[in-house]
Image (cartoon, grey):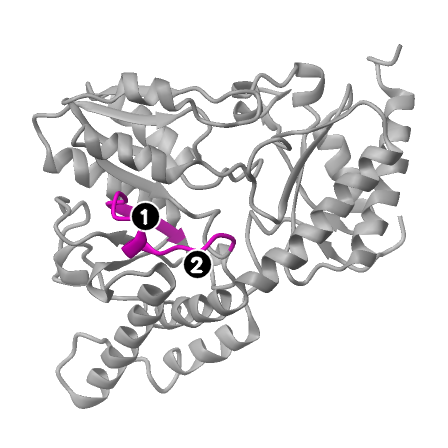
Amino acid sequence: MENKKLIYMDNNATTRVYEEVLETMLPYFKEKYFNPSSMYSVAGGVHKEMEKAREQVADFLGCEKVEVCFVSCGSEGDNMAIRGTIEAYPTKNHIITTKVEHPAVIETCKSLERLGYRITLLDVDNDGNIDLEELKKSVNENTAIVSIMYANNETGVIFPIKEIGEIVKNAGAVLHVDAVQAAGKLPLNMKNEPYIDMLTIAGHKIHAPKGIGALYIKNGTKLRTVQTGGHQERGRRAGTENVPYIVGLGKACSMVKSELSKFNEHTSKLRDKLEEEVSKRISDIKINGKNANRVSNTTNISFKNIEGESVLLLLDGYGICTSSGSACSSGTLEPSPVLQSMGVPFEYAHSSTRFSLSLDNTMEEINYTADALEKIVSRLRDISPYRN
């Protein structure tokens, strides 16, 4: 295949760092490299800039700046919330999450299960929606924390956090929300969502660099320190602050907040057009989560009886970057656990392809991608062992 212009449609995996974000960061690698905890005046200036970034993140989250704790990534934030909570409530041994969470939550819960904690994994329906009645029946006085994502990374399905929060609060448990895939796509305002005790975001999903994130910790929330050492982050997370990345996150938060309406309008048009064209041109497809409330930039499409990895590789040949919902395990291609939990039939589930868009994408790219998919699926079905 001849070289093509790169068409990036994997923004749920990571995003391009905005040029303005990079420019904001660069001085803190060079002339402003000081440790913000040092006593001399130039270090104090760096500390002030770090606190300005904290204010920017707080404005993005709709919270107080003292409620923002900087972490290295979404996975660390999730671990900190879950592990810190169970240590803060030693008499409670029950944790609730869902079957469609990110591994940062699922694997953390599994590791705690091996230590004797009881884990409840809530089901979702065929559209990817959580069963609120199951949550009501599961949460009890022994539940320390309920950890649930705001929006699913594979399908874009949005969970009803308000309703979830009311159930969790009535039971006296802590609610942690993994908002890594919601940040920059949905408005976040912790002052209007008092049922959320903790919430995680990751910088590289909102045009900041990899290696930085934030955990919102509502004032009054009991949380044990997981990473011990120095006094940084109000004693909640030890370690010298990563100032360049923190100021980058602050800048990204202010930019992404200002363009939220534009983002949703733009990406929803592109996503709807892609779904329309693929549905029109290709038979036997399934758009996973289509009937649910979804974030505007994400579509997950399955093509019956072909492998998602093959679609991915052939799209790459056209210069199109996407993700597959399948993972290679022990030499066999297994369907996404998320789609399995949704009851997607195997002949569709193992061929899922996720397209996640940004403001950088264009309608021209959508049409090009639809053309490529039509050719790719036809080619793969011609050689498929499942072909009738």
The image quadrant that residue 111 belongs to is top left
- Percent x, y for residue 54? 29, 69
Q: Is 378 above or below relative to 295?
A: above
Question: Which residue is at the front of the view, 312 or 182?
Answer: 182
Q: Are marks 2 and 1 in contact (CB under 8 Å)?
A: no
SS under mark 2: helix
State yes or no: residue 200 in magenta. yes
SS under mark 1: strand
Q: Is residue 373 visible?
A: yes
Which tag is nearer the camera, tag 2 or tag 1?
A: 1
Judging by the rendered image, the residue that carries numbered circle 1 is 199
Residue 27 located left or right of residue 7:
left
Judging by the rendered image, the residue that carries numbered circle 2 is 203
Q: Which residues are magenta?
A: 185-201
Q: Is residue 214 visible?
A: no
The image quadrant that residue 314 belongs to is top right
The residue drawn where x is 80% and y is 55% is 365
